[in-house]
Image (tube, helix red, strand yellow):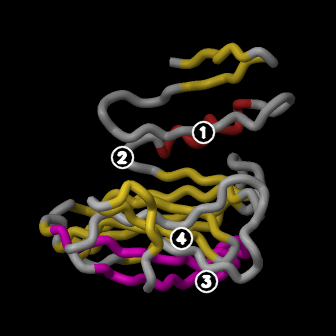
């Protein structure tokens, strides 16, 4: 299904790809004069739970998807691709990070000036909830196509899902500002930073 959403200043093209109960891939059109054809290459990511982010500071795209042979047997991976330019239909740098026997389900990503931040709900051997894991991936190295490490912290199963830091808009946080993972609690509907 595709069409246009009418707005007072014009219309915006949209397309829904795939069927069923899976989480959708959402792509935002770039605005007046920009072609929607650049998103057609992203259709192959429309199954399972892909994540697509636009890194507004580097003007690059970041796509991530978990990978495994079986949900009950590792190893489990998080695959990340970063576009080499602002053109999402061009070449990409690709990375794969192993989570061993911990299934990295429900991935959530954010763009921060010093890294791509992520959180996952980890299930030991794909079955037993082990708690959330928060990670920071080396954004600078990824943007250059170099070997890119990561730093991860496993939290206990007493923690519920965690959200990574993410910058929305064009204003960067103050230089050196840490990106705190946050969570909601039963006692509070507000996000509270976790001190790792």
- Locate residue 20 relative to residue 14 in the image: left or right: left
The stretch of residues the image draws in magenta is 129-155
- Locate residue 57 relative to residue 107 in the image: left or right: right
Q: Which residue is mark 1?
A: 27
- Find residue 12 and report its horizontal and vertical position in percent: 70, 23
Q: Nearer the viewer, residue 37 or 182?
A: 182
**Mark toward the viewer: 1 or 4:** 4
Which of marks 4 and 2 precedes in the sequence?
Answer: 2
Which of marks 3 and 1 precedes in the sequence?
Answer: 1
| Mark 2 closeness class: few <14, some 14–19, many ≥20 residues within 10 Å | some
- Find residue 37 and report its horizontal and vertical position in percent: 70, 32
* Residue 85 seen in this snapshot: no
| Spatial separation of the CA atoms under disc 1 and disc 4 | 20 Å
Contact, CB < 8 Å: mark 1 with mark 3?
no
Up the image or down, 27 lies above or below 117; here it is above
Q: Nearer the viewer, residue 78 or 44?
A: 78
Q: Which residue is mark 3?
A: 147
At 49% from the left and 66% from the top, the residue drawn is: 164
- Label 1, secondary structure: give it: loop
Contact, CB < 8 Å: mark 1 with mark 4?
no
Snapshot quadrant of residue 149: bottom right
At 45% from the left and 40% from the top, the residue drawn is: 46
């Amino acid at each position: 299904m595709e069409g246009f959403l009418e707005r007072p200043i014009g219309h915006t093209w949209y397309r829904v790809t795939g069927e069923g109960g899976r989480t959708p891939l959402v792509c935002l059109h770039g605005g007046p004069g920009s072609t929607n054809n650049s998103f057609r290459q992203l259709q192959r990511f429309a199954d399972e739970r892909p994540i697509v982010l636009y890194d507004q500071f580097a003007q690059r795209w970041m796509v991530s998807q978990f990978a495994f042979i079986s949900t009950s047997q590792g190893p489990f991976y998080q695959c990340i691709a970063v576009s080499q330019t602002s053109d999402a239909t061009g070449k990409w740098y690709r990375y794969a990070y192993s989570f061993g026997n911990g299934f990295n389900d429900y991935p959530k990503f954010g763009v921060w000036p010093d890294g791509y931040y992520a959180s996952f709900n980890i299930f030991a051997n794909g079955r037993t909830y082990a708690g959330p894991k928060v990670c920071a991936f080396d954004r600078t190295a990824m943007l250059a196509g170099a070997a890119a490490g990561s730093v991860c912290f496993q939290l206990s199963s007493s923690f519920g899902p965690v959200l990574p830091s993410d910058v929305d808009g064009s204003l960067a946080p103050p230089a050196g500002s840490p990106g705190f993972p946050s969570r909601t609690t039963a006692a509070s509907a507000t996000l509270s930073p976790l001190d790792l």
